Image (cartoon, helix red, strand yellow):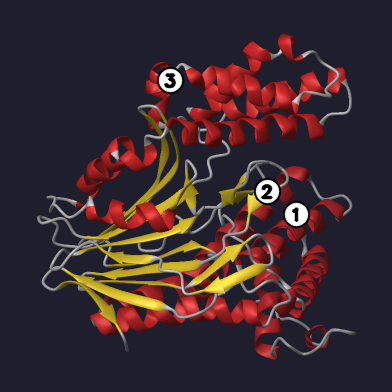
Amino acid sequence: MLDAPRHHLVHVGAPQILGDHLQRQLLVGPRRFLAPLVGEFWADRVSESLLSMVVASVQWLPLMHETSAEISRTSTVGFAVLGLRAVSGYQLGKPLRGTSGERRASMTAEVVVLSRRGLAIAADSAVSVGEAKVYHGAQKIFAVGDGIPLGVMVFGLSEITRIPSDLFVPEMVRALREPRSHLDDYLDPLLEFFGSSELFRDEPSQQLALYSDAFGLFNFIVQSSKGENDLRAEFEKLGQRISGSESLAVMAELDRLPEWFAEVVEEAMRDAFEDAPVPTDDLVDDGLQLVREMWGRDAFLRGINIVLAGYGTQDFFPGVVWLEVDAVAGPCIRYAERDRAAISFENPAVIYPFAQIDTINGFVRGVAPSAESGTRDALWEILGEVEGLDADVARQVHERYCERQDEIERDLFVTPILDAVGTLPLGGLASMAETLVSLTSFRQRVSSTVESVGGEVRVATIDRASGFGWWTG
């Protein structure tokens, strides 16, 4: 057994924000695993460097702004770092992306907590205008109807095809009032609403929304390039990025796009490329193909996120379905089915955070995702700096470390929490959901960033017998 020397427990220049026991575990665990592979000398060096990095990370946690981030990620050397997404009962949200493809911070915090007894949904009431203005009082949770065990939760963009969500969301919810056998069946009337509602049939509004998206795409190409050759290279690079993303359901319907689609795309392209070094005429066909391809794929999709939570009439256990709707053009709807989760006999509890997910993920997993991913990347960098260490051995060490870290998180945090969730009454689920959202709000309050999560936390419960009900504590 490898024990950490006592002098390792005190770090020069670092505050004692980690207890002796935790510091000892952070040293002993890696040393015990690394020593048989690389020897005790290298095991000591890597373990000490890793602990120093963790201490530094924890020091700065109060100042870190955690945006929506995926936990399962790929390391700098290209092999998968296993996350906990496959762990029964715990699901991770996905990042939202802006028009440039960069990660876009989500301006809300929402969560669904499910068990065999029912579910609770909670959301804050903050709404952001621009990057600095935040107002409170927004409604993000909606009841479908009396006695119907279904709730709707929204986040993301506040409009579709230039129609504000305040206007269409109540109408959308009313379109779901006819009971359905299973939760998934509610997707049909939901999509039918976007395809048939008069709110989305105004062609000038559709054209303006398409122009905005196309111009943003072409302007991104122009801003990323410096000359004719560079512009063509950026054009090709973006095309490869779009074609490599997942296909959407609308991909099979692109032939039904209205005739004005090409005209609007060409206008946006000419405006964006007005001062570009390449004649627009040379790129019109490529530009149209690029936007059509984007419309049929999950690249740069940024719409309103709709979460359906509850039961169908024949569902014994609750579930969640998550959809993102981006735009409407003629008879075509650009949307993505993001994810779903359901309670079953084998899966008795689920915690599903949405939008700003890092704080909730950190609570459930025992470590903030940004700190976890930073630790894993730092470990790989440290292994790369160890002189004489074989690359294959370093890769194996990194993979085994990540797997072991996932096991520790699952055994010490995720599983015990989910076990507790499975035993909670409906009020307990509601209290937990409210606390998780409030925790995210508190985290932002003590950080240096704009408090885009805040205001009153609204909570609702849903069970098979009583349907939807507001929870007041």
Mark 1 in CB contact with mark 2 (< 8 angstroms): yes
Tally of marks: 3
Q: Position of residue 260 (x, y in %)?
A: 49, 19
Q: Position of residue 386 (x, y in %)?
A: 85, 55
Q: Alpha-carbon distance for marks 1 and 3?
A: 51 Å
Q: Is residue 320 left or right of residue 248?
A: left
Given the image, on which type of amino acid does mark 3 rest? Pro
Q: Nearer the viewer, mark 1 or mark 2?
A: 2
* Quadrant that contains the C terminus: bottom left
Which mark sits nearer the N-terminus, 2 or 3? 2
Q: Is residue 34 left or right of residue 185?
A: right
The residue tagged 2 is: 75
Q: Nearer the viewer, mark 2 or mark 3?
A: 3
10 or 97, nearer to the observer: 97
Q: Residues within 10 Å of mark 2 (few under 14, many from 20)?
A: some
Q: Residues within 10 Å of mark 3 (few under 14, many from 20)?
A: some
Q: Is residue 271 above or below residue 29?
A: above
- Whether residue 294 is visible, yes or no, is yes
* Quadrant that contains the N terminus: bottom right
Q: Residue at x 89, y 84 (%)?
A: 13
Which mark sits nearer the N-terminus, 1 or 2? 2
Q: SS class of the residue under badge 2?
A: loop
The residue tagged 1 is: 380
Q: Is residue 351 left or right of residue 223?
A: left
Q: Is residue 25 left or right of residue 229?
A: left
The residue tagged 3 is: 258
Q: Residue at x 53, y 63 (%)?
A: 406
Q: Residues within 10 Å of mark 1 (few under 14, many from 20)?
A: some
